[in-house]
Every structure is written in structure tokens, then in C-alpha cells.
Amino acid sequence: MAHNEGLGANWKTRRAFWADRAANENTLRTNLLSLAATRTRHVGNDPNPERYDPDLWTDEFAFLNQPGQADIQSDLFYDYRTNVDAYPKWQAWMREKQPRLLVLWGKYDLSFELSEPEAYRRDVPKAEVHFLDAGHFALDTAADQIAQLVRGFIRQKL
């Protein structure tokens, strides 16, 4: 993620948390740490949710509900605002350096807008962009395809 406009609808709650942490802490925790939110991170709006092993989100949810984890995750997420503030610097670096860039994007991810992968092309016009039949954690359902794309990308001449 490197473009502010790529932040999806979930980020409204998250931005409110950054603006006033005390007033929005509970709402953020529901938005970020609930079982429904955890499942949505994996499945998104995939029309074939049966492709996902339910252990993916139930194990994550169990971890997130260990003592002290809600506080740790809230602190980490509060700090994430500094990443968003740094996006213009990251974009400038990409425009200047023009790195070889492979973007693999789960098209069922509800955390980020589908416009985000193409936004990388504004900064790196030769970026290789692929939309996958996957959610936020694309390896959940597209590991073989990802491995193939990464191998192909690495084999390309510089």
C-alpha cells in the first residue's frame, strides 16, 4: 500500500481512530479485531468462500484475543498512521528510482480499493500488475499462482 486513495471503506473508522484515539478505540477494536473483521480480512467479498480454510481466521482471531493483544494491536495500528503520512515519500522514491516492481493483488480484498494496484503504474509505468482470485492474504487461495508469477518476474532480464 502506497497511495492514500487506495484505502477502502474500512479506513473511515481507522482514520477516526487516528484523529481521536480515546473516542474511537472501541470502534477500532471491533473494526479490526472482531471475528467478523478477521474473517473478512481473509475472505473479503469472494463469491466462493468455501475455498478458504476456516482455521485461517479462527486461529488469527484466537491469537488476537490472547491477553494483552488488543492493546498491542491498537498500538501498532495507531502507529500505522505514520505509514500513510509517508506515502508521498514512498511515491517520490518509486518515481525517482523506477524499481522493478511486481504488484500482486487479491481482487476480493475489502481493505483496499481495486484502484490501488494500478496507482503503482503512475509511479512506475513498467510495473507488472496482477489481480488474483484472492482476498487480502492472497496466499490463502493463490499460492501456486503467486509462486509462478514471482518465479517469472525474477527470471526476467533486468
Image (tube, rainbow, N blue to C red):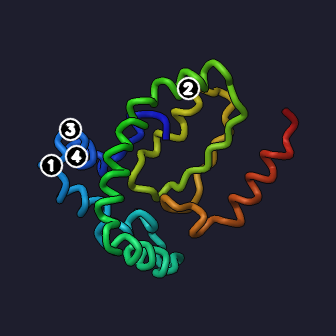
Query: SS for tag 2?
Result: helix
Judge left or right: residue 102 versus residue 115: right
- Tell me the residue that label 4 is attached to: 17
Q: How crowded is mark 4: few (under 14 residues within 10 Å), some or many (20 or more)?
A: many
Q: Do the residues labelled 4 and 3 touch (CB within 8 Å)?
A: yes
Q: Residues within 10 Å of mark 1 (few under 14, many from 20)?
A: few
Tell me which corner region of the image, top left, top right, bottom left or bottom right, holds residue 102.
Answer: top right
Q: What residue type is labelled 4?
A: Phe
Find residue 19 and name its label: 3
Q: Residue 156's spot in the image, x, y percent?
A: 85, 41
Q: Which amino acid does label 3 sit on?
A: Ala
Please tell me how many numbered marks the rendered image carries.
4
- Tell me the residue that label 2 is attached to: 122
Distance between the alpha carbons at the discs numbered 1 and 4: 8 Å
Q: Which of marks 2 and 3 is nearer the N terminus?
A: 3
Foreground: 107 or 85? 85
Furthest-left residue in this view: 23
Above or below, 76 against 33 in this view is: above
Q: What residue type is labelled 1?
A: Ala
Above or below, 79 against 123 in this view is: below
Q: Residue 124's spot in the image, x, y percent?
A: 63, 27
Residue at x 71% of width, y 66% of height = 144
Distance between the alpha carbons at the discs numbered 2 and 3: 29 Å
Distance between the alpha carbons at the discs numbered 2 and 4: 30 Å
- Tell me the residue that label 1 is attached to: 22
From the image, state whether disc 2 or disc 4 is nearer to you: 4
Q: Residues within 10 Å of mark 2 (few under 14, many from 20)?
A: few
